[in-house]
Image: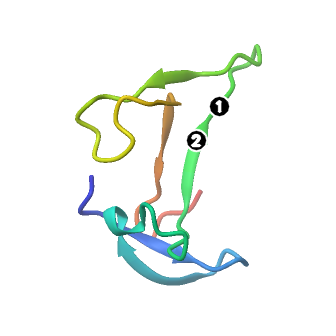
Amino acid sequence: MSGAFVDLMNEEENVIGQELRKDCHGNPKLSNRAVHVLFNARQQRLLQRSVLAKDIQSWKWDTSVGGHLDSGEDY
């Protein structure tokens, strides 16, 4: 959801503001929280090709599960 707000983080993992998720992509100055699942119990990588309709990095290999934490969410 590109209209969602995410928390901006400093190097100590403190919230320093909020920004739209879509504005954080491609801007290394806007650090925000994300989560990804990379391996299963047998240490196999879990990857999938993203859909063509994805707003960024469409049709690329990506983690099977992942995303940004909305503003106010914690890991």
Left or right of 29 on screen, residue 23: left
Q: Position of residue 58 (x, y in %)?
A: 34, 36
Quadrant of the frame with the C terminus: bottom right
Circles 2 and 1: CB atoms closer than 8 Å: yes
Q: Badge 1: few (under 14), some or many (20 or more) residues near its Cα, within 10 Å?
A: some
Which dot marks residue 46? Answer: none
Task: Give the residue at x 67% y 74%.
Answer: 13
Left or right of 8 on screen, residue 53: left
Name the residue type under label 2: His
Residue at the disc numbered 2: 36
Q: Badge 2: few (under 14), some or many (20 or more) residues near its Cα, within 10 Å?
A: few
Task: Give the residue at x 64% y 80%.
Answer: 10
Residue 3 in which image quadrant: bottom left
> Vertical placement of 70 versus 15: above or below?
above
Q: Which color scheme does this rendered protein use?
A: rainbow
Q: Where is residue 24 in the image (x, y as percent from the top left)?
A: 42, 67
Name the residue type under label 1: Leu
Q: Is mark 2 on a helix, strand or loop?
A: strand
Q: Position of residue 20 (x, y in %)?
A: 32, 70
Task: Give the residue at x 59% y 22%.
Answer: 46
Left or right of 63 on screen, residue 18: left
Task: Give the residue at x 41% y 62%.
Answer: 70
- State the count of labels: 2
Query: Considering depth in this image, is 74 or 8 the residue closer to the camera?
Result: 8
Q: Is mark 1 on a helix, strand or loop?
A: loop
**Inter-mark Cα distance, 2 to 1:** 6 Å
Which dot marks residue 38? Answer: 1
